[in-house]
Image (cartoon, grey):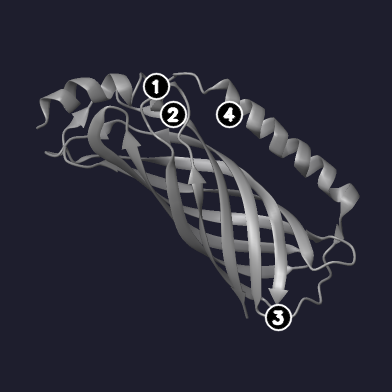
Amino acid sequence: MNDIFFFSAPQLKRGPLGGTVTLECFVRSRHIVAVLMLLPSALVTQTSGRSHRWEIAAVAGHVTADGDDFQAIKDAFGYGGIVRARVGGGFSLGVGIHYSDHGLVSLPEHLHIRAWYGEARCSLRIAGSPIMGYVGLRGGPVHEDVTIVNWKANGTVWGITSGLDWQLLSHLGLELQASESALRFGDVRGADGSVISGTAARGSSFNVHAALLVRF
């Protein structure tokens, strides 16, 4: 095992469970909540006569890992996909997957994070335009693994998302979104399957993404 990483990683990457989440996380969350509260005054409810019931989206953008337990984690480029179905009016449900590859400060290893999530969303159309605003909740299981030393951990992710959806063509759309999520991981398991005590972690992740949507 890489001795430098073994002694450095718990201090740099992980702190004891209960470490504080950064103030920036709460500031971002308050900004997103403020946007959610203001949206209804600028939008009107999307009509139920929308012709497309299903949509598939490919997403990509900037991902952070924040909090005392993630101090040595660099920001990353993340990407993924989601399938959604309209269930009535402006409401839709979806399932998706997201992946990001984070470098570690002063260490050669990389942290890979994969999340599977469900999403519930409410979309509202801006009057007289092809643009919709939306707000949503998402959450599900998340898995991380550290390269070279082959450390792994499982956890959960829960968050809020909001953004704008622009209908470019009949079956094609473009989406811009921002989301704030809470991350929680259990203790890391080493390459031999043994649990490394004291490595559970919690923090947050702020994502800014663009998505290309195909509707049918």
User: To which residue does mark 2 refer?
Assistant: 202
Q: Is residue 48 left or right of residue 107?
A: right
Of marks 4 and 2, which one's residue comes earlier in the chain?
A: 4
Marks 3/2: CA–CA distance: 42 Å
| Labels 3 and 2 touching (C-beta < 8 A) | no
Q: Is residue 35 left or right of residue 84?
A: right
Please, what is the three-letter code of the amino acid marked with disc 3? Ser
Classify 56 as above or below 180: below
Of marks 2 and 1, which one's residue comes earlier in the chain?
A: 1
Q: Residue 72 at x, y = what percent?
A: 36, 27
Please, what is the three-letter code of the amino acid marked with disc 1? Leu
Is disc 2 placed on a helix, strand or loop?
Answer: strand
Please, what is the three-letter code of the amino acid marked with disc 2? Arg
| Labels 2 and 1 touching (C-beta < 8 A) | yes
- Image quadrant where one finds the C terminus: bottom right
Of marks 3 and 1, which one's residue comes earlier in the chain?
A: 1
Marks 2/1: CA–CA distance: 7 Å
Checking the image for residue 170, the label placed there is 3
Q: Residue 85 at x, y = what percent?
A: 62, 70
| Labels 3 and 1 touching (C-beta < 8 A) | no
Q: Residue 36 at x, y = what percent?
A: 76, 43
Quadrant in the picture for residue 143: top left
Quadrant in the picture for residue 13: top left
